[in-house]
Image (spheres, rainbow, N blue to C red):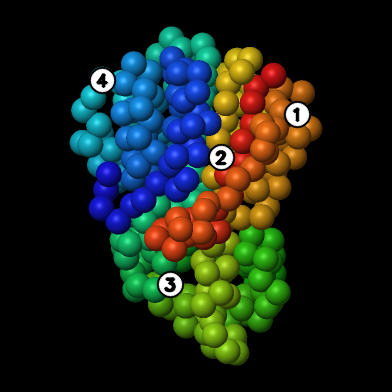
Amino acid sequence: MVRGHLPIMPTEILEFLCESSPDLIIDGTSGGGGHTDLLSKKLPKSKILAFERDSSASEKLSEKFTQKNVEVINTSYTKIPEEMKLRNYSFAGAALFDLGLSSIQLDTPERGFSHRTDGPLDMRFDRNSGKPASQVLRFMTEKQIADVIYKYGEEGRSRVIARAIKQNRNLSTTFDLADAVRSVVKGNPVKPLARVFQAIRIHVNGEFDHLEKLLSEMHLWTTTGSRIAILTFHSLEDRMIKLHFRDSEYFQQFDPPWMLPERSEKRTNSRARSARLRLGVRL
């Protein structure tokens, strides 16, 4: 496991996914490889396809996993059906998706994900495609920025923050963006900063579009009884998954439909504090 990266709710996830010893498991967001490693050791006879959109993280995963039962695939989880078909797999018996940022991304200043360290305002999961956040913001209108911050960050001061962002014409680093937010937020700026950075990251990477595509196609590569575990960190994505498992003709909510980390885990792993584990089963 990569130092500094702790998998969230490992016991609960292993218990849920490994009960039937599925032949094929999808880890749709392998990240630092924490969950992938645990699944590989728990079920050494099962095949695990570890998807990772971030090319730098994917390279580290490929170096880490030399065992035959793990295959690292450097692409988005939206490509699961195509990648499975290429490898002659019809269905997966279990799948895991951790929708949060990994500690590796947050702790690497040049990736531009954190307001706590100075670096280029990039925020892309895949630096080989798309535009960095600095360029995206430059070509957005003040209203568009405000809408993104309000929708994806649920930040009530979105308009004044958007105005401050547009007034800084040379916005190029994480500290530039953080300073713009601080200039119009009274009191402790930590929560507004986190919301703004989260919202812009979601927009730059099209995260909700990717999630919507995943949910709409998940029935194509799962079979009756397949178990799906999804770690959410945002109320909107959590609601999307909740409604899908509740209302889909192909899935139903597990009992219990969701779980929260234990207090002890929240104390030792800061990423777990806002996490919720959604559980679904293929009909």
Query: SS of the residue at dot 3?
Result: loop
Q: Quadrant of the C terminus?
A: top right
Report which residue position mark 4 lands on.
68
Of label 4 and label 1, which has the lower sequence position?
Answer: 4
Residue nearer the viewer, 117 or 140:
117
Query: Do residues under tags 3 and 1 come within 8 Å of each other at their CB atoms?
Result: no
Q: Residues within 10 Å of mark 1 (few under 14, many from 20)?
A: some
Report which residue position mark 1 lands on.
248
Q: Is residue 188 visible?
A: yes
Query: SS of the residue at dot 1?
Result: loop
What residue is shown at x 57% (from left), y 68% (from top)?
A: 195
Report which residue position mark 2 lands on.
230
Q: Quadrant of the N terminus?
A: top left
| Amino acid on which the number 1 mark rests in the picture | Ser
Q: Residues within 10 Å of mark 4 (few under 14, many from 20)?
A: few
Report which residue position mark 3 lands on.
115
